[in-house]
Image: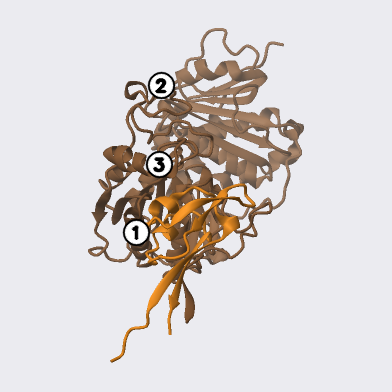
Chain colours: A orange, B brown
Amino acid sequence: METKPKKTFRCDIAFDECKGCSRCVEACPRSLLKLGDAINMMGFPAAVYAGEGCIGCGACYYSCPEPGAITIVEITED
Amino acid sequence: MSEKIKLGRPAGFFDVFERRPGAIKKNMHYCPGCGHGVLHKLIAEAIADLGITHRVVLAAPVGCAVFAYYYFKCRSIQCAHGRAPAVATGLTRSNPDDVIISYQGDGDLASIGFNHILQAANRGENMTVFFVNNAIYGMTGGQMAPTTLPGQKTQTSPLGRDVLETGYPIRVCEMISQFDAPVYVERCALTSFKNIMAARRAVRKALQNSMDKKGFSLVEFLSGCPVNLKMNAHDMSEFIETKMTKFFPLGVYLDRAAEREPIVRAEMNYDADKIKSLLYPEEIQSELGDYKCSSPVFDKECRVKISGFGGQGVLSLGYILAILGKQRNFNVSWLPSYGPEMRGGTANCSVVFSKSHIGSPEAAENCDMLVCMNQPSVEKFLPILKAGGVLVYDSSTVKLPEGAAKDHYVYGLPASDLANHLGDLRAANTVMLGAIAAVMADNFLDDADKANLDTAMIEAVREMFAKKAKAADINIEAYKTGKEKIEFKSVPKA
């Protein structure tokens, strides 16, 4: 019996493109994002992703006002 | 294991914002948490997904989104404050296949440009309006906007908006949806994921309407301005969802695109010769060619005021003089006065001749000639006739006051009576024209100018009545009568 390949997701945050508004932090249904301690090129504390658990819903992506600060990556296991 | 980008930088944006000055080329200029960014992303994603980046023209407003043309991979134009719908109207009328987006904020759309949006909506122009409502003037630092909530504190309402003094928030969607022409009106909020997804659908629906030429679509977005409202992301969303939506309920106000036929307008004509022939009908070629008047009186600017009752043809008389000036290669201006006087009172016009530039087209003072066809005109305009100037009046309607016009050349003739006698009272103005010709010939013209005066005058009358040959004949008769019957009254008592 053929099984569907397993899909997982990852939230990549471009450190220097985040303005630290925390909209994504508010939006994430699984609370996987928070503002980090490091200050980026523009002088903002960029958001950081917890590392795992992303369901690829896009809530953070669409809440983010920056064009390329958040990228949702879909990972397909062989 | 393989990876692919599910959601990334939308293809409707430039990869690098080269137009944006400074070192930061990947980000937009908006403050952290700004709703504009969220909406820009939805639009950029939609125009890429719909495959219309080459068809979209974005009319950017004045406000925070003034630099929208830095970002979108489409044609853009930045418009004067509030005038984006007017510019968008021109765009859609001249290029009906384009998808026109008018992107506006609440200060731009609902205040300075409010009439523009209402008229564009009422005409049902084929455009999409994205209206960002953040209840405040963002770009200028947080002043009260037409959409500011009652009691809301801003820079210019530090005690909170007082509805007694400044009224209530203007509800744009509710107003626009009252018109018959628009096809789609919806209000969304750029807050929660759910609301943003509703906004995403609305953006696409509105753009689809424009692509299908269904007409006017407007989507309003309740949007956060966290910096000016001094709120964090959480409070900002809460403010919008609990306070703003009370005055600005979310939802679809109008959706009738499905029942509307696509807009089809008349074919545009860009042929230069055709346009020229429509704008400038054929002119009578003057026999005088490039003849220039040599009389010394024309060495300086000559200012003529013509006044009388509305309906006596004073504007036409001025216009004939203007044609005459044009045929003799003067620079000439003709300025009619359209005042409340037009309704049965005194109408007047100014004609200015000059061999060089004309300073002002309005003969408001120091007139060289005054032509009066009713009594109020004499009282009103005699004071602006300069000493040594010429007064010509219709003695059948005007009685010159005792001792008036001592410093002027004065001529009179019963123009109305003469015209009546000729069989058409409407020709009184060309009787006056004849009188003017006689005055000029008697006092001011040299022999060369006198020799072709009649030719020029008759040509001017024929051009004025180019489409009415019979009227032209009557008026030429009237001109000759006026020239013959003029009565000399007095010269300046110097």
- N-term mark: 3 or 1: 1
Q: Toward which corner of the image does residue A24 lie, by quadrant?
A: bottom left
Can the viewer see residue B182 in this picture? no
Asked whether the residues under marks 2 and 1 belong to the same chain, the reply is yes
Q: Chain of mark 2?
A: B
- Image coords of residue B66 (percent x, y): 54, 48
> As displayed, is residue B447 above or below residue A11?
above
Asked whether the residues under marks 2 and 3 belong to the same chain, the reply is yes
Marks 2/1: CA distance?
36 Å
Q: Observer-nearest residue: A67 or B478?
A: A67
- Residue at horizontal 66%, vertical 16%? B491
Q: Quadrant of the C terminus of chain B?
A: top right
- Residue at horizontal 32%, vertical 57%? B198
SS type, badge 2: loop
- Image coords of residue B321 (percent x, y): 58, 38
Residue B197 numbered tag: 1
> As displayed, is residue B262 above or below residue B250?
below
- N-term mark: 2 or 3: 2
